[in-house]
Amino acid sequence: MSRDAFFCKEWLPNYRLLSPNDINELIAETTSDGRVVVKNICDSDQPCNWETTIVPISQISEKIHRIWGAANHLSSVSDSPEIRDVINKNLEQVTSFWTDFSQNKALYKIFDNLRRGISKTSHPQQHKVLCDYIRDFELAGAHLEDDAQLNFKQNTIELNKLAQRFSENLLDSTKATAIKVDLNKEGIPIKSLEGIPTHVLELSKKEAKKRKVDGYVFSLQPPIYLPILEYSSNRSLRFDMFCKYGRRSSDIAEEGSLFDNSPIIGKILKLRYQQAKILGFSNPAELSLATKMANSPEDVVIFLKELAAKAKPFAQKELDKIKDYSNQIESIRKVEPWDIPFISEKLKKSRFSIDSEELRNYFPLSKVLSGLFETVKNLFGCEILKEQENTAEILWEQSVQVFKVVSQGQVTGYFFFDLFSREEKRGGAWMDECRSRIKYDSGVQTPIALMNCNFSQPIADEDVFLTHDEVVTLFHEFGHGLHHLLTEIDYLEISGISGVEWDAVELPSQFLENFAWEYDTLQKISKHKDTGLPISREMFENIYAAKNFNSGLQMIRQIEFALFDILIHKELNGCERLNDNQVYKKVLEILEIVRGEISVIKQPSFVLFPNSFSHVFDGGYAAGYYSYKWAEVLSSDCYARFEGKNDREKSILGDSFKKEILSRGGSREAIISFRAFMGREPKSDAMLKHLGLVNTSS
């Protein structure tokens, strides 16, 4: 593939023709070009200005980000030995380029001089770009002595390698484990499969055929694992699935210690503490918060514990109700964690006449997408249209769909939808940037988003039906996508989600989730599999009544993750002197302390969730997982303005939300954007109300 074909500014890049060799060559070319650009700027005896300094750096940076992003995207959605080789071969080269860039003392001085010469009042966006650069220079050690810089660089390279290994181990451990259920001579499963949804059985039978065995093969992929925990009447099967899932990437996994992440966790934390100390921070949590809204780790801990204090009484009541109901319907003497999803689903159906699997019949993916796009058009005035030109030849997977965003008759962006679970695809749901909006002399480069989910694979040519939880997930990721696609900022560094504080990045995504709970939206996105009818008003009332079912338990679980994350990055000073296993042991000690203080459900010791905590150990959420709850305060507050409004009023508010938050990117501090939309400081009242975590008489 030619360089120009991949780095196109208007049309779509071709992933299908992007070979491992192409990626290797393009990374080598762009990083080499980048070093030449930096050298020319630093060696120039001409006065530096925006056009001669920031513009060429932005242009080459965009190319490096784009090709390295493509490599990582393919690693996430289409893992293979070849793509792993590309990542591992180029990891050090790319990391070295960015570390050398950020530690360049001459460049640091040039940028600082530029910042002093550009007025915040007359050129606020350029000033923000330069302020962010200076901060990042300092957080990479541009001000350090050479020996300290080298140490920091070596640590950074090693941390990136460890994060990649963590990710690969988790994917491999998940793929290595499955439960096989054989058939007897009469062709009947030897284990009871009662209660398991039909589509899960069909997918598991399909997996068995793929492996050339009889019966069923139940993988640990979420579309299989979660429904079994929620619907299988076979308690031993639920326990087996729960155990295998909780032991992934540990030394007690099914495959033994082959993909064990325990020592990797120890190594990562030791290096993070070293990095923080090199830069003069007390711990990695302080370093992490240097780019976030929260002021200090102590403030984060207080924030989380205050939320926990409000949520825990509700969580305990919810657990008591689950246990009471279990006594009525099941002969289970002691309710265990692998029983809770199953009993909860039955209790929800009993209380609200809602069965999540029956509700699935109302949400065909095609209808959900058309309704989502209509909702977005009503709120933000942009059309979402399927790209009609032939895109099959550019896709990494044929089930991927391509859409374009049209505003006032102009195409302003594109996005790829990769929505289905595959063995070679990492779990979860996420949005990545493919290409950012930048204004060139020749015109504006349109942004492209990569939106990914893990819904059940289609069976034959039938439409896929989603649970309502999956609908909410789709709305969430689309909120991220809109943040990237509706930006009106011309500079790479602060366009879309770039330059946005990490604890504010979830604001648009969590904001859009709320509309998946509105009656008008549900009318747009629902169409029953057999009758073709949308959800009735009565059914909606039941769905909405069940919205906050077990919300206390869910809140406490998220706070457990967030508090664990901030504490392992705050309370392990001196861990650098310990071996990896000793550090990992201390990590588990902190986990037990957090569980003892926060949780109401006692987890078995074999549930080693740190070993699969991708957000923290191979994602961008180290000492930042609290961001979900922090941003939920902001998003709930914003959404409260839309409640009870008619379509015209929502459209006016949506235009304001787009103008003050979505379009602004990282051009100003997130709190300024929030105030511009809300006219005041954030309050947590709306979030607690939306989650049902307010005292009532019941």
Image (spheres, rainbow, N blue to C red):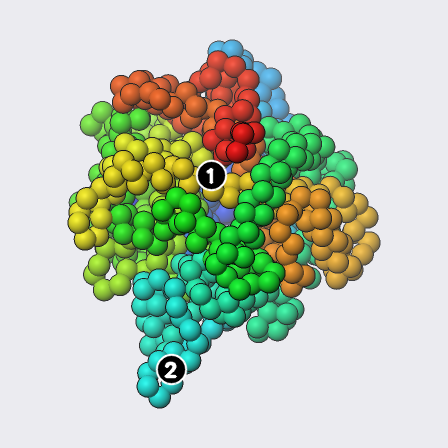
**Quick one: label 2, few (<14), some, or many (20+) residues within 10 Å?**
some
- With respect to residue 537, does 653 lie above or below? above
Question: Could you tell me the amino acid type at mark 2?
Answer: Leu
Location of residue 100 in the rendering, given as x and y in whole percent from the top left corner = 61, 43
Disc with the residue nearer the chain's start (2 vs 1): 2
Q: Residue furthest bottom?
A: 185
On-image quarter of the N terminus: bottom left
Location of residue 237 in the rendering, given as x and y in whole percent from the top left corner = 49, 69
Question: Could you tell me the amino acid type at mark 1?
Answer: Asn
Helix, strand or loop at label 1? It is loop
- Quadrant of res 254: bottom right
Residue at 35% across, 80% down: 188
**Quick one: label 1, few (<14), some, or many (20+) residues within 10 Å?**
some
Left or right, residue 234 beside residue 415: right
Left or right, residue 346 beside residue 300: left
Q: Residue furthest front?
A: 328
Helix, strand or loop at label 2? It is loop
Residue at 50% across, 17% down: 675
Residue nearer the viewer, 324 or 66: 324
Residue at 51% across, 11% down: 121
- Quadrant of res 158: bottom right
Contact (Cβ within 8 Å) of mark 2 with mark 1: no
Which residue has dot 2 on it? 183
Residue 472 visible from this viewpoint: yes
What separation in Å lies between label 2 and label 1 (alpha carbons)? 40 Å
**What number is the disc on residue 548?**
1
Residue at 61% across, 21% down: 113
Left or right, residue 236 beside residue 604: left
